Image (cartoon, rainbow, N blue to C red):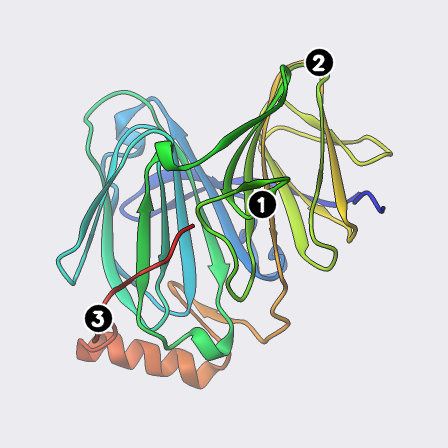
Amino acid sequence: MTIRNLERVIPSIPASDGAGVKLRRSLGSSQLARHDPFLMLDEFFSDDPDDYLAGFPSHPHRGFETVTYMLDGHMQHKDDHGNTGDLGPGDVQWMSAARGIIHSEMPQQTEGRMRGFQLWLNLPAKEKMKPAAYRDIASAQIPVVSLNENVKVKVIAGTLGQTVGPIRGGSTDPYYFDLRLDPGAVFEGALPAGHNAFLYVYEGNALVGEARKPLPHRAAGVLSDGDRVRIEAGENAARVLLLAGKPLREPVVQYGPFVMNTREEIEQAIADYQAGVLSKGEIGRIKIS
């Protein structure tokens, strides 16, 4: 048994995306701030409608997956194939852009809190030109495990003991847990050795590994290899995302919303978008357990 250590801290930085939505970006804040197969993690959180009302108007993607996890507020997804999905508190959309999709993500509220995350997860070269697919996952479909009275874990992807999340398997075999820890509480759980893993503390702060290295609020923490993770809340309650995936070990060439393996593939994606054929083909549904 090897408990993973905290190897690197990536502070989140203020950023904006879409039509000016204010957010904080940790992974993806630079090309050096990636952790294969994870490309980017954004946190959006505001009580001020001016920070989010403009939303994310129609835009393209190719070559990777986006995972949107809502904590508060309502967001609506629409794509160029006529599909519409509504995300409310606790809901998740897991979308594989693959060959291409053009969609929008727009707030369905004019006041109140908007809070959540968007994760970008890379696809292997052999899957980048497959048909796009997505699945909206209601909060009620996502299991919550109470390990004890002080630790609760929402299992969005992967497995925790005998509990299986709605997304599992695939080329990167992703794990996506949302941990809620009372002050001083400790989570210790298994992750596959060889998976790359990181944490993101979005409430409170955490102590990581046997060395109890501090990971501050609104920072991502890259973990060493190992088969177990230990996370301890500080003097206040903590909420922490734990993410892990099988590394692809392939070249990454990114141009905005396109993530491919070569410059030539990026140029083709731009040409396809300009020609109106980026998302040609059917949209599938991602199978959930």
Of the pair 168 and 222, the residue shown nearer to us = 168
Give the labeled residue for mark 1: 159
- The quarter holding residue 83 reads bottom left
Q: Identify the residue under disc 2.
A: 235
User: Of label 3 and label 1, which has the lower sequence position?
Assistant: 1
**Which residue is most to the bottom?**
264
Q: Distance between the residues labelled 2 and 1?
A: 29 Å
Q: N-terminal of the two: label 2 or label 1?
A: 1
The Cα atoms of the two marked residues, 2 and 3, are separated by 51 Å
- Mark 1, residues whose alpha carbon is within 10 Å: few (<14), some, or many (≥20)? many
**Residue depicted at x 25% and y 42%:** 55
Give whichever of discs 2 and 3 has the lower sequence position: 2
In the figure, residue 173 lies in which quadrant? Answer: bottom right
Number of residues whose C-alpha sits closer than 10 Å to that of mark 2, classed few (under 14), some (14–19) or many (20 or more): few
Asked if 273 appears above or below 138 in the picture, the reply is: below
Q: Which disc, if any, is residue 84? A: none
Above/below status of 239 relative to 1: above
Q: Tell me the element at label 2.
A: loop
The one nearer the camera, 263 or 5, is 5
Q: Distance between the residues labelled 3 and 1?
A: 30 Å
Residue 58: tell me if it is visible. Answer: no
**Which residue is denoted by mark 3 in the rendering?**
282
The residue under label 3 is which amino acid type?
Answer: Glu
